[in-house]
Image: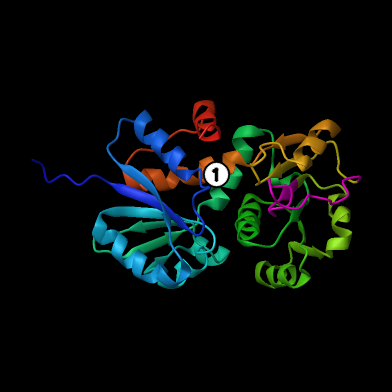
Amino acid sequence: MTDEKIPVAGVIGAPIAHSKSPALHDYWLKRHGLRGHYVPLHVEQSDLAQVLRTLPRMGFRGVNVTIPHKQSVLDLADHVTDRAALIGAANTLTFRDDGRIHADNTDGFGFIENLRQNAPDWRASDGPAALFGAGGAARAVITALIDAGVPEIRITNRTRTRTEALRKEFGAKLTVYDWVQAGNTLDDAATVINTTSLGMTGKADFRVPLDGLSRDALVTDIVYTPLETALLEHARMRGCRTVDGLGMLLYQAVPAFERWFGERPEVDEDVRQAVLSA
């Protein structure tokens, strides 16, 4: 008999069955020979507060957070990092020994690390960035790009009011374009990012005109199903450097795994294949 507690973590959302996070964390647990479990938890909005207060009592070290709870958890956390507060969403919760909830956002870290590892010569300061979308992922990417030194972010979204709100919040580095002018954001853009669900399997196609895309641009898509979206395929055929969205998922999980299980995992081709085959 032993009184050692086996660490448990998970991911909460609604729906959650599609999540690749359990396969990722399970792979790392086995690779490092660690005792622990990572489980998907379908949690409805009406149950969120009660669930979050109960999980620490059940031995959970923390949870990842996905749609639709990334904003709601900020109001339920006892401590919110400056980064999560600025982004306006949290994707990583850590439960303290006393049950207090620490909220953070590692999406921006995952985005930047994905670019740095898969396009080592990329620099945010190389020129303007063109960004499609204005949701939670866009907020994390904007924060990361500004921190990395981007000179301008040209942002466009199907609902202009959301981009205008971001412009007021993040300041003069953001330039708002109407969705019908989305193709104009590409002129001389050094970095092109899709943070919408357009082009994802089962979603509407990404139909932004790409005539203005520079061959020198780096193009990335946070969508990873399919791994090579139509946007990335077009960019690759044009001669652009491209980075798929799977790496962002993998890298954003690194700090969380280290906090919960005590080892800092590596992102390599083996873990990519393990997640893709799950």
Residue bearing the label numbered 1: 249
Q: Nearer the viewer, residue 254 or 196?
A: 196
Give SS at disc 1: helix
Residue 247: x and y in percent read 58, 39
Q: Which image quadrant: the N terminus?
A: top left
Percent x, y of residue 238: 85, 34
Tell me, yes or no, whether the highlighted magenta stretch contains residue 210.
yes
Location of residue 8 in the rendering, given as x and y in whole percent from the top left corner = 31, 48
- Residue 152 shown left or right of residue 97 in the figure: right
Seen in the picture, residue 233 relative to 205 is either above or below; the reply is: above
Q: Main secondary structure of the magenta part?
A: loop
User: Is 10 on the left or on the right of 117, as rendered?
Assistant: left
Residue at image x 55%, y 52%?
Answer: 107
Q: How is the image coloured?
A: rainbow
- Kindly identify the residue that appears in the image at 30 percent across and 54 percent down: 60
Amino acid at dot 1: Leu
Which quadrant of the structure image shows residue 75? bottom left
- Residue at the extreme right: 211
Q: Which residues are magenta?
A: 192-211
Graded by Cα atoms within 10 Å as few (under 14), some (14 to 19) or many (20 or more), the crowding at tag 1 reads many
The x, y position of residue 114, in whole percent, is: 60, 40
User: Does the magenta-highlighted stretch encompass residue 112?
Assistant: no
Q: Is residue 180 left or right of residue 278?
A: right
Residue 33 drawn above or below residue 253: above
Task: Please give the name of the residue rendered at 61% of the width and 37% of the height, measured from the top-left corner.
Answer: 116
